[in-house]
Amino acid sequence: MPRVTPLSAVDLPPSLADVFSAFAGGYSDFRDQAAVLAHVPPALDHLYRMLMELRAREGVPFRYIELAVVTVSKLNACPYCVSHHTPLLEVEGVPAEAVAVLPESDHPAFDAADRAVIDYARLVTTRAWGIREQAFVELRRHFTEAQIVELTLRAALAGFFNRFNDALQIDDGAAEALLHLHPEPNTATGDTP
């Protein structure tokens, strides 16, 4: 259960209700997230419209977006995002056993472009301040500068959504099930629940 009262499309002005409905039931069911983000209408409007527009314009093939999102979400241990984006990645042709090794890029199902995206998403998440030029050399072999900017945006935005979802306990049951598979250690004692 989220830490704030979930809202619905009927709680919003019609223009925002349309954004809520379109995103909540779009390419995956993000209704739980939309119900919480709706408390801040400008954020719901701008973030979700931007994500839908990026998806529609197909500036970066969706496989690479999802590789970046799942990599970041696994690094940040966000069960909601992992549970919602993994099926999208599998639709893009990435087998379950390859998804399982993420955030590592060493799997035969990953080609050079996949590995560049995975490695870059990991760097954006863990050490954005110290990314070496070689990472960009590898990205430029597969992507335009505009695509590199969008990949960076999507990886960084995934980190935002990971923290947003975790802090406000946004869950639809699938994420909670993942938490029980990988319990969080108690930082005071080092124990797991």
Image (cartoon, grey):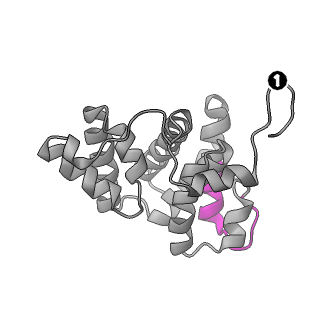
Which residue sits at x=56%, y=38%? Answer: 166
Name the quadrant of the C terminus.
top right
**Looking at the picture, how far across and down is residue 98, in whole percent?**
70, 68
Q: Residue 170: percent from the left, percent from the top?
A: 50, 43
Q: Describe residue 4's horizontal placement relative to residue 114 as left or right.
A: left
Which corner quadrant of the image does residue 45 belong to? Answer: top left
Amino acid carrying label 1: it is: Ala
Q: Is residue 114 magenta?
A: yes
The mark total stands at 1
Residue located 33% across and 62% down the image: 26
> Residue 5 vs residue 106: left or right?
left
Quarter residue 13 falls in: top left
Q: Is residue 71 visible?
A: no
Q: Is residue 173 magenta?
A: no
Q: Residue furthest toward the left?
A: 14
Q: Is 149 situated above or below 104?
A: above
Considering depth in this image, is 100 or 29 the residue closer to the camera?
29
Residue at (30% x, 31% y) in the render? 40
Q: Which residues are magenta?
A: 105-119
Viewer can see residue 154: yes
Tell me residue 177's x, y (percent): 65, 56
| Secondary structure of the residue carrying numbered label 1 | loop
In the shown orientation, is residue 69 left or right of residue 43? right
Q: Residue at x 12, y 46 (%)?
A: 14
Residue beneath disc 1: 188
